Amino acid sequence: MKATTSQKNTQINSPARICPLKNLSPESLSRALEAFECGRLGQAARIFEAVLKRDDIISGLYQKRCKCIARLEPEIVETENSPKAKRHAEILRAFYSSIEARDAFDKNRIGGARLLISQMMDAVAMKYSCHKIEFVRRGENISANFTRYPLWMFENTGGELRLLEREGQLSRGTELNPAEWLIFTADALMAASSIAYLYKTMALRDWAIYCRRNGMPGIKAKTDAFPGSEQWIAACKAASDFGAEFHAVFSQGTDMEAIDMSSKGELPYPKLVERMDRALCALWRGGDLATLSGSERMGSASQWYESTIIEEDDAENISSAFNRQIDPAVIKLSCGDETPLARFALRLPDYETHIAELEVFELLAKMGLTGDPYKIAKRFGFPLAEDSRANGGENNG
């Protein structure tokens, strides 16, 4: 394997201008998800992309999940204590500090290792993330350009991702050279999230229609004027100006009974929307029954830190992908060694220390000793409600 300054670029077409959510229904979503499971990724991938951008809850959860891992400090760990291991560690440090991450279509997005990791976290939503690798030599060191390709440019009907020549292609795509592609796989949370999104938007649409139809009172006007006269026309205009949605004008002695379509009890729409949003929070960030049962309840400290399991798993998966697909190639290109004696890793926070501290706070609270909620929340990076944060800020000057 040789490092090159240029490489044959894969020909890609501009993305089609389509709106996959325009006519989305339970039937069409079901067909897209079934095709996705069979390896036809395009339709579902387009839906997933659109939902990730347009739904406020899913977009926020997705960004938090990605940035939570991308912000972790990278480190190079030596697997043995030897001069060769130290040399391998130096090579990998220089490599990961010099790489560039790009996007196949959005040429404005350029970054380093942090952007690359954030792009790889797409697999948590989409199941796969795909980067074309171009190893280059920058001075005396080996570096690489990573270009992200959207998932709808691939098919998986044979059990391995293949690159399509055009979107919607039904024949099998071109095989990927493992030395030229970084393929990362993860949870595919958008399969379940898209279902929650669909039913939430259906409830929101019906709720909006209900508010439009029943949120404003109708205007009923009576006049002695003869229909068609100037006085009649003036009464009609006045009723129209006051009641933009529902208005009526009757001559004296004419009456009409209104059919009240508004609900006398609690509307079902808010509950359904809230249920879907809570389900999405549990799916993306972890949760328990205490989290779902009310906004003011958190459960025990150990339950709160169960969400760190997700972060640990994401960090380990990213590190393992680099260890399998990148570290050996970099070491071989740099010095010819087949087995790297150092590896890339993402450094996780010390969760055990935080858990021990929270247990101490719980014990002190049981003894009647309470601390400043603002300072405690700041210590653990936990977001407080606006009113609590404002009060804490006042108490702390």
Image: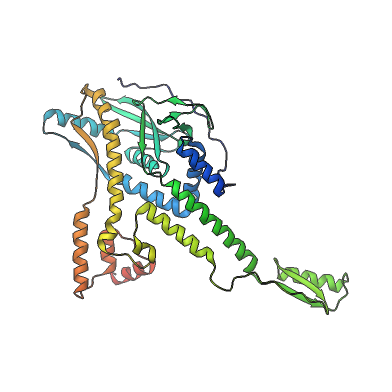
Name the residue: 31% across, 45% down.
314
Where does the image place residue 17, in percent across and percent down from the top left?
57, 38
Can the viewer see residue 150? no
Name the residue: 39% across, 53% down.
283
Where does the image place residue 334, in percent across and percent down from the top left?
24, 24
Split into 4 quadrants, where in the image is the C terminus?
bottom left
Name the residue: 36% across, 33% down.
183
Picture layout, residue 251 above or below residue 312: below
Picture layout, residue 281 above or below residue 134: below
Q: Tally the numbered discs.
A: 0
- State the residue in front, 372 or 264: 264
Scheme of image coloration: rainbow
Left or right: where 79 falls relative to 29: left
Residue sitting at the far top: 2
Where does the image place residue 339, in percent across and percent down from the top left?
20, 27
Residue 219, by quadrant, is: bottom right
Left or right: where 152 falls relative to 386: right
Where does the image place residue 104, in percent across and percent down from the top left?
45, 33
Picture layout, residue 70 above or below residue 133: below
Can the viewer see residue 261? yes
Split into 4 quadrants, where in the image is the N terminus?
top left
